[in-house]
Amino acid sequence: MSKTTHGPMHAAPTLADWVRAAAVAIWLCLWAAPATADVRIIHGPTPIPGGDARSAGDITVVNEKLAFGLAVESPAPYGVPRGALVDLAPVADGHIGRDRVVFADFIPNNWSAWPNTYQHVTVIKDTPDEAVIEADRDWGAAKIVTRYSLKAGSDEIHLVVTMTNGGATPLTNLRSGVTLWPNSGFLFAVPGLAAVEDGPATGALSDRVVAYDADWTVALHAPYLDHVGYGSKDMYQTHSLAPGESRTFEAWLQVGSSGDLAPIVAEETRRKHLPSGVVSGAVTEASGGGVGEPVVVILKNGQAYAWTLGRGGRYSLALPAGDYTAYATAKGYSETQPHALHVAAGGAVVQDFAGLQPPGDLTFHVARKDTGAPLDARITIEAGQKPLVEFLGRRTFFTELDRKGVAEAALAPGDYVFKASYAADVLAAPAEVRASVVSGRAQAADAVIDVLFDPRAQGWASADLHHHADQAEAVTPPEYLARSELAAGLDVLFVSDHDSMVNHRTLQAIADRRGVPFIPSVEISTSWAHFNAYPLRLGEPLAIDTSRTDIGAVFAEARRLGAQVVQINHPFIPYGYFASLDAGVAPGGWNPGFDLVEINAANIGDDPKVLAKLAAFWNRGDRYYLTAGTDTHDVWNYLSGQVRMFAHLDGPLTPATFAVALKAGHAYATYGPLIFPDQMFGDDLKVIPGAPLALGFGLKAVDGLKSVSLVGRDGVVATQDLSAAGRETHVAFKVSTPVSTWYALTVEDQGGHHAYSNPIWVDVATYPPQ
């Protein structure tokens, strides 16, 4: 056996390092030769393109089907302890494909295996027939041992994880299991649980999740499954461990070099010893010719179960015995009517599909109602064909950067209803567009949007202050981040990728092209808290190891990078800073060196907690202020700017002036309603004790106003019903106070969207006695 333990992150290269690097280079040359089924272990920087296991002590395992890399010395993402699988790629025709995962690791309780004090990685077996590697780590009082096995000729890694409670007290109500976080492509959630973001696995038709694109798949098979998290990326079992008790979790990571799910279904059938039969047939166009690359989708109990990719107009798929429905489609093509299938054990079912129609082209032109000027927009299919297999066609489109207001789409023929939106629910209501797409024909569709409000004319600018591009698990290229943020009516482009600044210069160039400011940021991502820091010097890399740091070092690094602002992201989720402080697990404990606390659209249920915590700070006179962001990773499925910060600027809009306004509290967070205060948020008003004070606010809402509440140190001071006010009004509150205090505003519109302001500070002043 050989044994490796983690070493320093930035150690200078030694002679041994150069030897290892040379060996890897020679090995890569050899690997380009015709493939064999042998398993090989490589020590050193991974040969997987785009891989993250880049240090001399890291380990990569390769056979003819797949390659995976373990971070032994390299830092793992999100501060995950070393020993994690951070790279996974298909191998085809002797060539290793790109890395397709951020990480795939064992989670002991709804988050990473942290807190952690040691990690040991040991090569147990290294033969041409099989490689076995063991990662041994602690998690508090528990010990976690993960064994990775890969056999020659196999397309799957076998994972066996043993979790042992070495402490004196029970570990109760744990949610433990293996995770699969892809870094690109799409996700096919556990069949039957597509609508479940986090919850019991009741109704699951299988125990697998698949990350995929047209030319690859990665499936996680998890037979212990009884609960899913993060939309099936995390697959848990709920359990407890008594002192000294152990529990074993078994899983498989299966890798393919195409988007075909047939091998995944076959593996599931084999592993569960299920009786099965074969469905096959032809797929033809309306003209009678075969569809070159058909896709046949299988439904079970009305839910998406699997699909297979055909070739040359034909397909074949083995399925567990049972009843299904199926339909055929192809990229941009129409879908056939579903056909009922009964698959008997050992049986063969022939089912042909006919009548598929090739796509038509639709060009959208989006313009303002008042001036006719072109408008950035997000366009979604509300009714019409929405491909289940996402590489066959998008359901969301954006207007172009250099042809403002223009979007082009190839769509399956049929009748559609589209929604074209600009600053949806904030500045304008979406416009409905109806179109009938005809196969082989190019057509145009016009969308006119009535932009109702112009906050910029009154000195207010908005930004989504938590937004990802295409690093880590995010899948939005920089161009589409810009297109999405512009369609959201945001005045500033903003990116905060996990621990990465690689997109800064590209987005700055796009911002310059479009004449808008760009705020470069980074989300410093430890396992116990996430922080956005901005604005930063362009492209300068992070210089701390997020798995071995504390709160003081995080804040120091943010300031070193040039940050004027440090915000606490999603503070109450399991790995939020306030949650970690409350649990006593934040390294360095309490540190007051931050500026803002986030309202996060991805965790909207935590908004009351955020507001309550800020109120507690304000009651003590601590001037921490609001920030807001969506945490969008995928602009096609999530909405940029759903929540945003409006900041009032003194002078031109620049990254620096926007940051200054946020730090001064001259800002509010909103999901829709707009606020125009007579007295600026964050400012101080000096009054005589008990003297009457009038606080006035202009209010606007696309969806119509519903109510407004004035909030103070003891809670809600007064509420006004605005149901009859329509879209715009001005309100005033008369208050008096014998002591210094603060007042903030909460506004709700008829659509249930809220806006939350920073406080106006009221300082009671008296004439000092002689």
Image (cartoon, grey):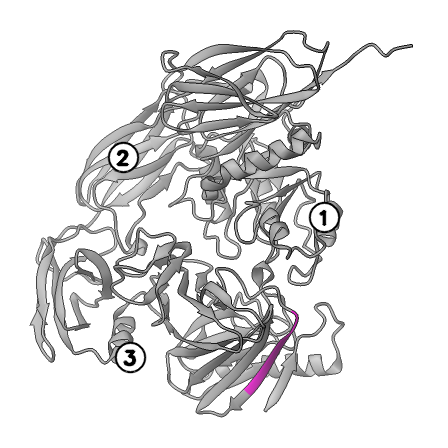
Q: Is residue 355 above or below residue 52?
A: above
Name of the residue lying farthest toward the right:
770
Residue depicted at x 72% and y 18%: 763
Residue depicted at x 56% and y 50%: 497
Q: Circle 3 sits in a helix, a strand or a loop, which is it?
A: helix
Residue depicted at x 20% and y 51%: 333
Camera-nearest residue between 615 and 1: 615
Confirm whether the magenta stretch covers residue 174. Answer: no
Camera-nearest residue between 531 and 71: 531
Tell me the chief SS of the magenta region. strand
Q: Is residue 56 visible?
A: yes
Figure quadrant of residue 544: bottom right
Residues at circles 3 and 1 in contact by the CB criterion of under 8 Å: no
* Residue type, label 2: Phe
Read off the residue under disc 2. Answer: 418
Read off the residue under disc 1. Answer: 555
Residue 84: image x %, image y %?
A: 54, 71
Q: Circle 1 sits in a helix, a strand or a loop, which is it?
A: helix
Tell me the CA gap for discs 2 and 1.
Answer: 45 Å
* Residue type, label 3: Arg
Q: Is residue 79 above or below residue 566?
A: below
Front disc: 2 or 1: 1
Query: Viewed as shown, does residue 596 lie left or right of 190?
Result: right
User: What range is drawn magenta here?
Assistant: 117-123
* Residue type, label 1: Phe
Q: Earlier in the sequence, mark 2 or mark 3?
A: 3
Near mark 1 (Cα within 10 A), the count class, few <14, some 14-19 or many ≥20, is many
Tell me the CA gap for discs 3 and 1.
Answer: 49 Å
Residue 271 badge: 3
Near mark 3 (Cα within 10 A), the count class, few <14, some 14-19 or many ≥20, is few
Camera-nearest residue between 679 and 108: 108
